[in-house]
Amino acid sequence: MTESDRVPPTASALQERVLVLALMSRDGELAQEALTRAGIAAEVVRGVESLCEAIAEGAGAVLVTEESLTAAATQLLLKTLEREPPWSDLPIVVLTTMGEATGLGLRTIRRLGPSANVSFLERPVRTMTLVAAVRTALRARRRQYDVRDYLQVREEVQQALRVAHAEAERSSRAKDEFLAMLAHELRNPLAAIVNGLALLDSVDPQNEIDARARGVIGRQVHHLTHLVDDLLDVSRIVSGRIELERAPVDLARATRQCVEARQSLNGTHQLTMLSDARPFMVDGDAVRLEQIIGNLLDNAVKYSPPETPILITLREESGQAVLRIKDQGVGVAPDMLESIFEPFTQIATSLHRAGGGLGLGLAVARGLVEQHGGRISAESAGLGHGTEFVVRLPLSSASSVTPEEARAPAAPPRRIVVVEDHEDAREMLLELLSLQGHRVEGAGNGRAGLNLIVESAPDIALIDVGLPELDGYEVARQVRRTMGHAVRLIAVTGYGQSYDRARAEEAGFDLHLTKPVNSKDLSLALGAA
């Protein structure tokens, strides 16, 4: 077979071979023959340069005579070993002279010992001993290969996890951006409806038909607003981005307020609250606690027949405030008692979906309860037997705080500019403000709004954020640069995330209101100017 006909060794064969370097070629050949007879692949190399090249290609062990390791050869070998990967510790078996170590042998030990995986065999050496030493070296090398393979697999797994994490982050950002945009687009028409309803309530005496129709509109707007809020909140809760503004909160007072609000919105159910005549103080976010209670009450109303009672009780048990909301509605199957708290899960009672909703209210409630350090559970005897939701929150030692209910003062007449690109929302807000005695002007895009504010110098500017030509943030910045703080700037927008509020503050807004804005909040904002 010619040199060109030889099949190159595989990577596996290279990493198992023993490289033999001897000053006398006959010594190398004898060692190779002994190892080959023992089933060990061995290859004689000519000179230390060839040895270093072969090590770079792959080797299981090195067998070398001490006289081959001159100072220059040893230095070259050490440099080659330094270039090996971190997992590699190539075994080197050095054949030394029998008896007392020669000066050359001592130098070899000093040069290689601290930096290399070296073992020594004294000559003459029995074939059996040589083979055993080389096999031991190869076993050590195979363990290194196992470490290499493990590190490689771990790196591949970590890389796959990094890629998956980055993709999940991209997907999460895309989802959040979509939900924020969806909320903005939904809140614009809601704002127009709310303002239109407030306008009707202000100018048109209500007969019985008007009252019923407006009640329906009010309830449905309330329902749609909660759907939008739940859609955004469940995403933030899952990703851990809900921040609680903690303070001492009387859970009994918060529960009573929620019950009274539901009774005014929906008079078809009998909501009864039983509680000890005392405050139940918890350390929590008042808005989020009311959201928890409201979601549970809405769920009870949704899945209960009209005129059926809904019982709300609040008691202290083992240092915890325990809120129970019990209905006599459709009930929950035993296998659904845990899954109903998962997002988009609903009780499938019929195809017509009379209750409506997205199946997010309970998921939001659970996330918020857990962020408050509490637990929420559901109990039911089965379908058709009603459901009881139980919320347990740790009681606080804080003293009772009973803040005055904020009243919406009648704001004195103001000069107000409304910058809003949604025509219906703008026109309804202008009409409502005008009816309240304010002098109002409006603009439908950012550049026109900026010019109007600078030219008319109003007391207040109500500015949407998502404006064409010039967004609301830039309008606010330019107003501040031009007019300082002579104008009170209020962002009235469908973007209601915490970072939207922070961005509004950074741009120079005095206040951030999320659409749809109820008349009470609007009056408070105008009255504070």
Image (cartoon, rainbow, N blue to C red):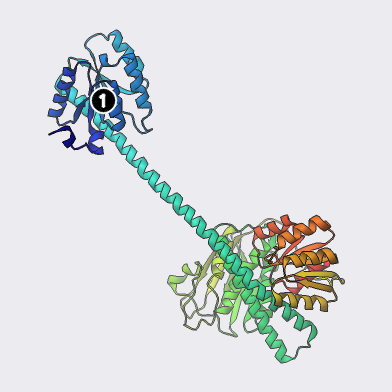
Which picture quadrant has residue 84? top left
Q: Residue at x 44, y 54 (%)?
A: 164
Residue 325: % across, % down: 58, 72
Residue 507: % across, % down: 73, 56
Which picture quadrant has residue 61? top left
Residue 372: % across, % down: 60, 59
Residue designated by label 1: 62
Q: Is 165 displayed left or right of 144 in the figure?
A: right
Q: Residue at x 72, y 89 (%)?
A: 210
Residue 146: % across, % down: 30, 38
Could one spot residue 39 in this view of the protein?
A: yes
Q: Is residue 245 above or below residue 212?
A: above
Quadrant containing the N terminus in the rendered view: top left
Which picture quadrant has residue 257? bottom right
Identify which residue, 397 or 140, lies in the foreground. Answer: 140
Q: Is 64 displayed left or right of 82 in the figure?
A: left
Q: Residue at x 30, y 28 (%)?
A: 53
Could one spot residue 400 in this view of the protein?
A: no
Quadrant containing the C terminus in the rendered view: bottom right
Say few, some or many: other residues with alpha carbon within 10 Å of mark 1 (under 14 / 14 to 19 / 20 or more): many
Q: Residue at x 83, y 58 (%)?
A: 483
Q: Is residue 130 above or below residue 448?
A: above
Amino acid type at image mark 1: Val
Q: Which residue is the extreme one toward the right?
A: 412
Identify which residue, 296 or 148, lies in the foreground. Answer: 148
Q: Is 168 displayed left or right of 79 in the figure?
A: right
Q: Circle 1 sits in a helix, a strand or a loop, which is it?
A: strand
Identify which residue, 406 or 193, lies in the foreground. Answer: 193
